[in-house]
Image (cartoon, coloured by chain):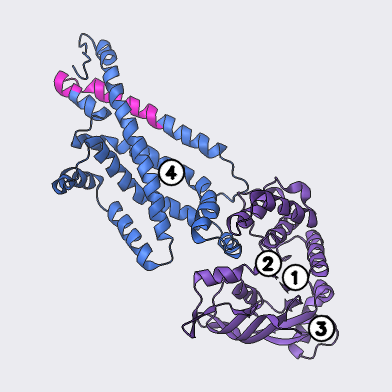
Amino acid sequence: MLFGIEWDTSSNLAFAISILPILLIGMWVTIQATVLGFFIAIVLGLVLAALKSVPLKIVSWPAYAITEFIRDTPLLIQLFFLYYVLPEYGLVFPAFLTGALALGIQYSAYTSEVYRAGIEAVAKGQHEAARALNFKSLRTFTHVVLPQAVPRIIPAMGNYLVSIMKDVPVLSVVTVLEMLNVAQIIGDRTFNYLIPLSMVGGLYLIMTLVASSAVRYLDMNLPKRGLPLK
Amino acid sequence: MTDPIIKFDKVVKRFDTLTVIDELDFEVGQGEKVTIIGPSGSGKSTVLRILMTLEPIQEGVVYVDGDMLWHEKANGGVKPAGEAHLRRMREKMGMVFQQFNLFPHMTVRRNLTEAPVKVLGMSKAEARERAEELLDMVGLADQADKFPHQLSGGQQQRVGIARALAMRPKIMLFDEPTSALDPELVGEVLSVIRRLAEEHDLTMLLVTHEMQFARQVSDRVCFFDRGKIKEQGTPEEIFGNPKEERTRAFLKAVLEGE
């Protein structure tokens, strides 16, 4: 029994059917962690990218250093750090929030590079026109550069959305009851790992396929308005 | 000539070791229409880019409308201009770019209203009204809701001119406004600029390769060579009877091509 739902081990099919609702509860946690982690990644990544594009080294250099540090250390270490070390200093977050935060921080390093590539692809003449029209730099960024960069970066962002989704099982090590963790608990208690793990694989495939087609749909239906896209 | 609205005083501009503007002295009077001609790499466009504050200078002083452009007064001395000073100075000028540089994600109308509303603080209604007038003036009154990529190059450049005018500049800078255009579209852009020159007391500074046009609209033509004015005078003087050997050679080469 898990989440108050009993399983039926009389046959493989009955077992599969009986644990599906349990796995779906785990899947809902996976989706929530993905969405929250991705949201943190795209917001924090934008902040990092904006800092990196500042011409002052004292601003851009730390942003580069942070990005590099995050990218070059394992997600698991960052997760352990947030989960075990921060509470020693009085910062206690629930496991789910800690996990989503770790995913978001890790992926912000990647998304910041995507933003940066998108930002740098905006023609120099656009900056010059904005300057000639006396826009402030922040307005140039939000009203001229970003709207032209975003349509270019959607495919790459979509790939990271799928990646985050596939990294959510890492959160099981800090007790988050996402889908894989749930499947493992079922396996531990019934000694049948084949069926729950196969089902998790199948459910994952469905989730990633849905996510990537949603991204593709968005990419194809976003107005390009003559932006020179590669 | 009354007090010059633009004055370059021994201005030097270098890119690394390459000197692009070499101790340039140059003046433009209020309302004067000046064209700059010369071989590529002679620093023509750089003069405009320095004025629009797109390129800083290394030596000398530039004055615009009585104020130093790249410097400001501080404690009895002079220091490099800060962003606030540059913003104040930029308000006096508008620029038309060779590559148009319209904002591709905005409609024509928003290209014209964005800066007046957000930078000058004009009301939306006023900015829109003004945009209509300007589009009408450049012959594009019916294109306001289109995006730049839906327009021809000539139309885009006319929008570019209207966009610069929407900021009510005292000085208009045209950086090879027709160089990126197909030959059959050059005329429509030049006629807009010509009308502007004839009907307004704007100060205009044009870099161009259209010699016929330079001859018609300019009060004065400056021939640039290696970062300096090699020769300047009325269009009749420069095109009719150039004194310098370099000017003659340049004009001969260009006019043979036409």
Return the residue at label 3: B234
Q: Which mark is residue B169?
A: 2
Q: Are the residues tagged 2 and 4 within 8 Å (C-beta)?
A: no
Q: Residue A201: say if magenta.
A: yes
Q: Is residue A190 left or right of residue B55?
A: left
In this rendering, do the residues under marks 4 and 3 share a single chain? no
Determine the residue positioned at 49% across, 73% down: B82
> Do discs 1 and 2 share a chain?
yes
Tag 4–tag 3 contact (CB < 8 Å): no
Callout 3 secondary element: loop
Three-letter amino acid code at disc 1? Leu
Q: CA distance from mark 1 to mark 4?
A: 48 Å
The residue closer to the viewer here, A220 or A1, is: A1
Pair 4/3: label in front? 3
- Residue type at mark 3 is Thr
Q: Are marks 2 and 4 on the same chain?
A: no
Chain A's colour?
blue
B80 left or right of B217?
left
> Under tag 1, what secondary structure?
loop
- For disc 4, the marked residue is A157
Chain of the residue under label 2 = B
Chain B's colour?
purple
Contact between labelled residues 2 and 1, with CB atoms less than 8 Å apart? yes
Please name whichever residue, A123 or B81, is drawn nearer the observer in this view of the structure.
Answer: B81
Q: Which residue is mark 1?
A: B202
Position of residue B183 relative to residue A208, above or below, is: below
Identify the subunit bearing mark 1. B
Q: The magenta stretch spans which residues?
A: A186-208
From the viewer's perspective, is B170 left or right of A106? right
**Looking at the figure, which quarter contains the N terminus of chain A?**
top left
